[in-house]
């Protein structure tokens, strides 16, 4: 692949103008473009209700996220994991409109415009987030087992904090299921992070520094 010389040219908004869409990262045989990094920054800022940051440091952080996403896509393509549908993403979109914009799609769209986004881009990102969550659940939850002793040990170790957090009923019987679910979630997250770390090492990942200037 002549990746060092490849530039993606995309027509700009002004007549006759051209925007150079550089390769930002190569992951195996796949490329992540500058426009992908830009879109990730805008969507992430919108979802997290943060000011848009397009600095080199922020772009590098976004590129790291996109590398992880590309690795997950490779695994999804190789294995038969079930995926959420458009209806699930639409439901999340409606929930955002309800919680942040009083249910107004018009206000939602106006906010998206301020971040340089569209409703379709946001819907696509929400669908991807749901896809990743389902992948993690299907791929790692079956291998995680929390023993009763683990639950009891956590309860005994953190009893003082639990009493402050749940003053009405901090008995072991009342909190054991909550503790088990929390420990299971932590174990799943750790299994996922370990898998991702190993997958990164198996892939050729090349950053094009010019794309982060």
Image: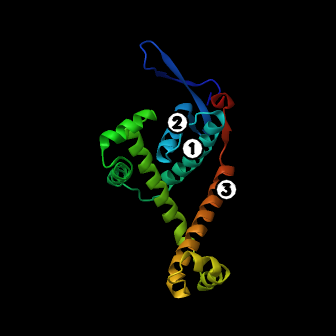
Are the residues at dot 3 and dot 1 in contact (C-beta closer than 8 Å)?
A: no
Q: Quadrant of the N terminus?
A: top right
- 176 horizontally vs 57: left or right: left
Residue at coordinates 41% horizontally, 39% vertically from top-left?
121
Instruction: Please say if 169 is above or below 32.
Output: below
Q: Earlier in the sequence, mark 2 or mark 3?
A: 2
> Residue extending furthest top?
16
Helix, strand or loop at label 3? It is helix
Instruction: Please say if 82 is above or below 204.
Output: below
Helix, strand or loop at label 2? It is helix
> In the rendered picture of this protein, how many numbered marks are placed on residues?
3
Q: Position of residue 151 (x, y in %)?
A: 60, 81
- 178 horizontally vs 103: left or right: right
Mark 3 sits on what residue?
198
Residue at coordinates 53% horizontally, 43% vertically from top-left?
50
Instruction: Please say if 144 is above or below 31.
Output: below
Helix, strand or loop at label 1? It is helix
Q: CA distance from mark 2 to mark 3?
A: 24 Å
The mark found on residue 66 in the picture is 1
Residue at coordinates 62% horizontally, 82% vertically from top-left?
155
């Amino acid at each position: 692949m002549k990746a060092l010389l490849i530039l993606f040219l995309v027509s700009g908004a002004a007549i006759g103008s051209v925007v150079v869409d550089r390769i930002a990262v190569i992951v195996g045989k796949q490329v992540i473009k500058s426009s992908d990094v830009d879109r990730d920054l805008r969507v992430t800022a919108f979802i997290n209700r943060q000011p848009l940051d397009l600095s080199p440091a922020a772009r590098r952080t976004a590129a790291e996220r996109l590398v992880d996403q590309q690795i997950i896509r490779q695994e999804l393509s190789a294995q038969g994991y079930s995926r959420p549908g458009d209806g699930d993403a639409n439901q999340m979109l409606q929930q955002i409109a309800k919680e942040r914009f009083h249910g107004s799609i018009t206000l939602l769209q106006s906010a998206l415009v301020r971040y340089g986004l569209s409703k379709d881009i946001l819907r696509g990102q929400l669908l991807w987030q749901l896809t990743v969550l389902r992948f993690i659940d299907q791929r790692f939850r079956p291998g995680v087992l929390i023993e009763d002793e683990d639950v009891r040990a956590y309860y005994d170790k953190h009893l003082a904090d639990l009493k402050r957090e749940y003053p009405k009923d901090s008995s072991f019987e009342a909190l054991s299921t909550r503790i088990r679910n929390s420990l299971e979630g932590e174990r799943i997250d750790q299994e996922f992070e370990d898998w991702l770390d190993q997958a990164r090492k198996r892939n050729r990942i090349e950053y094009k520094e010019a794309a982060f200037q």
